[in-house]
Image (cartoon, helix red, strand yellow):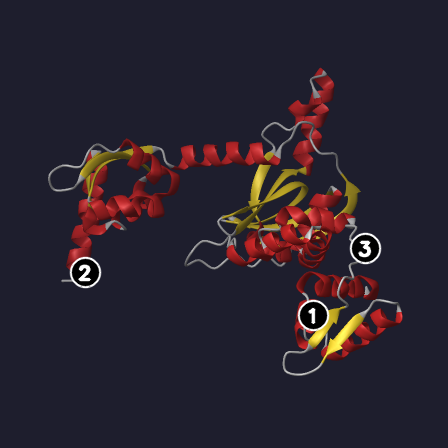
Amino acid sequence: MRADRLLSLLLLLQNRGRMTAPELAAELEVSVRTVYRDIDALGASGVPVRADRGPTGGFRLMDGYRTRLTGLTDAQAGSLFLAGAPGPAQELGFGADLAAAQLKLQAALPAELAGRARRIQQRFHLDAPAWFREADPVPHLARIAQAVWDQRILRVHYSRWNGPVQRELWPLGLVLKGGIWYLVARAAEEAAAQAAAVDAVRRPAEAAAGDTVRTYRVGRFTGVDGLTERFERPDGFELAAYWQESAGRLEAAVRRRTATVRLSPRARRLLPMYFGAAGVRALADAGPPGPDGWAHTELAVESGSVAVGDLLRLGAEAEVLGPPDLRRDLAEAVAELARRYR
């Protein structure tokens, strides 16, 4: 661990120039006293570290000195795909590896490209969670991520709407959607049963994946135990393709109704925020505004009280024209609100 820290200290000085002991301590997450000891160790090993005194002082490398010890470890290389999302990287347990990998990459770049990389980092930031919503607590995420990486079966306790359940899962991948983590996995018993059926009729191995792959919200795991038993990933399974197809099926299953609505200019601006992709499609299909600025369109909505609640968010900026039962349900809800607030 100390060797990794000394290399990180050296790369920080090489990439950023003069830094004070408190700045180095904050970057390395150690004490200032540890920084001084590490500076002495670098000097004793032949690294020309200069100490400048005074208000603008700090530690720096002698002009012209550069190290070429920039090789990435397996863990550091694997963390690079999260370079734009430091928060999720930290949750997955890759925070330290990602920081070290970025330092090594900066040290390996020519000065002009390294400067550009730093400017990009200063100017662009990815914040995954949605507005006005706290992310789920995910105390088991790092263990789940390790099982995904190692292809090891997990025994989990999961809180469903109808009560807790226990499962053994083959963890195939993790997805971060709107600040919420999801595990894509197969139930071990279903996978074994389907694999046996595949062998019996001698179909291609990739058919074993079937519909046994499911999505679990990581924040609902109340307990996770990693097992020593390994599993084989289904042939041909692609996480991104599965997620896209699964998300499409979910939206089609949830938004089964179509409402004919009349929208004010403000409601049209709010539609993507409140209804997501369905709102974007409704805007694209909207007719031209009339003299009053209002426009008609068709909007995919959920059923029953969910649709009523969603449409009421638009307030007086929208009018539902059909279907008749949805318009009636909205009228009853508005009348009840009027009585309550009279």
Q: Position of residue 36 (x, y in %)?
A: 78, 77
What residue is rendered at 72% in x and 66% in y? 13
Q: Is residue 223 visible?
A: no
What residue is rendered at 68% in x and 66% in y? 17
Image side of residue 60 versus residue 55, left or right: right
| Closer to the eye: label 2 or 3 | 3
| Closer to the eye: label 1 or 3 | 3
What's the residue type where badge 3 is placed? Leu
Which is nearer the eye, 256 or 192?
Answer: 256
Q: Position of residue 280 (x, y in %)?
A: 34, 38
Q: Are marks 1 and 3 in contact (CB under 8 Å)?
A: no
Quadrant the C terminus occupies: bottom left
SS label for mark 2: helix
Image side of residue 230 versus residue 178, left or right: right
What's the residue type where badge 1 is placed? Glu
- Residue at image mark 1: 29
Q: Position of residue 177 (x, y in %)?
A: 51, 46
- Residue at image mark 2: 340
Is 29 situated above or below 243?
Answer: below
- Residue at image mark 3: 69
Mark 1 or 3, nearer chain start: 1
SS label for mark 3: loop
What's the residue type where badge 2 is placed? Arg
Is 44 situated above or below 167?
Answer: below
